[in-house]
Image: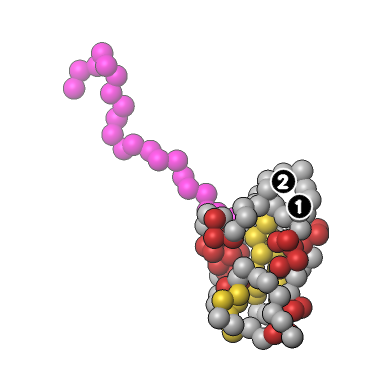
Amino acid sequence: MLWPPCPYRKDGRCGAEEDRPVTLEDCQACPIPEALAHPQACLYLVPFRMEGKALFACRFTFTWAQEPAVADWRRLCPCPYWFPRAPEEAWIRDLRSLQDRYRRVLKGEEPRYPPLVPPKTDSRRRRWPWSKG
């Protein structure tokens, strides 16, 4: 049996699942290559594997969607916020860090919403051009 083409598999390890070893059966059952080969695969689509299960998230809707990651990529593609996917996964900027962040969020290790940063306040008194000192 032949291994299906997948941009994440290298030397029998799955890059979509933190470089864990993958079997032929797992790779054949994985929907990630099918999703990436679809003509409506979007730049915002973030495929990743967690605990042996393929999940898909949208970097555009991740923080406010009811379901941040779904098992069926067809629920995310096509959408009105569609951008064509790069021909190679390596060209997509910050994809690996997003996959890692989404795993941490789904495991509960990181908050889903970015923390609100209070506005920077200058402790010094504002100086007007016409004021002295």
Q: Position of residue 71 (x, y in %)?
A: 76, 68
Q: Residue at x 77, y 48 (%)?
A: 79
Q: Residue type at mark 1?
A: Gln
- The residue stretch that appears in magenta: 113-133
Q: Within the magenta stretch, is there residue 129?
A: yes
Q: Which mark is residue 82?
A: 2
Q: Position of residue 105 (x, y in %)?
A: 60, 66
Q: Main secondary structure of the magenta part?
A: loop
Q: Residue at x 76, y 52 (%)?
A: 40
Is residue 105 visible in this depiction of the protein?
Answer: no
Q: Are marks 2 and 1 in contact (CB under 8 Å)?
A: yes
Quadrant in which the C terminus appears: top left
Q: Residue at x 40, y 40 (%)?
A: 120
- Residues at marks 2 and 1, CA–CA distance in whole angstroms: 8 Å
Q: Which numbered disc, 2 or 1, marks the residue that appears first in the sequence?
A: 1
Sort mark 1 into few (<14), some (14-19) or many (20+) by Cα contacts within 10 Å.
Answer: some
Q: Which residue is mark 1?
A: 40
- Residue sitting at the far left: 133
Picture quadrant of residue 127: top left
Q: Residue 102 vs residue 74: left or right?
A: left
Q: Residue 23 vs residue 101: left or right?
A: right
Q: Residue type at mark 2?
A: Trp
